[in-house]
Image (spheres, grey):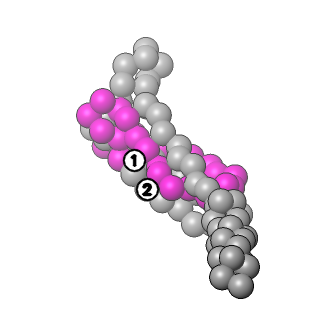
Amino acid sequence: MLRRFLAFVVIACFLLSLPLAAQFSSAVEGTVMDSSKAVVPTVTLTLKNVDTGISSTTVTSGSGYYRFPSLPSANFTLTAAAPEASRR
C-alpha cells in the first residue's frame, strides 16, 4: 500500500512539473556601433512587443552594450535614439 502511494506521489509530481518545463524566456542583447564600427554609448533603445504593445527601454553602457533580459517568445521591434550630444 505504501509503495503504491509513493509511486502515485512521484508520478503526480512529474506530471505537475511538465508545464513548468515548457516555460522559458530569452533575451535580446548586443552592442550599438556607428557606421565606422565605433561603439556608441548612452543610446536609448526601446524594445516593443508587436502583439501586446508592451515596451521596455534601456540605455547602452559606456561600451555600447545593451541587454533586454527575460523576454517571452514573441515578435519585437527595436528602435534606437541617439544621445542628445550626437544629434547636434
Nearer the observer, 32 or 2: 2
Residue 6: where, in percent of width, then height?
65, 76
Q: Residue at x 43, y 17 (%)?
A: 37
Image quarter of residue 15: bottom right
Going by the image, does 64 lie left or right of 16? left
Q: Please tell me whether mark 1 sits on a helix, a strand or a loop.
A: strand
Label 1: how many residues lie within 10 Å, few (<14), some (14-19) or many (20+)? Answer: some
From the image, which quarter does the C terminus lie in? top left
Indicate whether residue 87 is drawn in magenta. no
Say what amino acid the circle numbered 1 marks.
Thr
Residue 73: where, in percent of width, then height?
67, 55
Nearer the observer, 6 or 55: 6
Tell me if label 2 and label 1 are in contact, CB under 8 Å. yes
Indicate whether residue 83 is drawn in magenta. yes
The residue at which mark 1 appears reads as 44
Image quarter of residue 3: bottom right
Q: Residue at x 66, y 82 (%)?
A: 2
Sequence-wise, the earlier of marks 2 and 1 is: 1
The CA span between labels 2 and 1 is 7 Å
Say what amino acid the circle numbered 2 marks.
Thr
Q: Please tell me whether mark 2 sits on a helix, a strand or a loop.
A: strand
Q: Which residues are magenta?
A: 59-84
Considering only vertical position in the picture, is 10 above or below 1?
above
The residue at which mark 2 appears reads as 57
Image quarter of residue 53: bottom right
User: Would residue 79 be visible to someone looking at this image?
Assistant: no
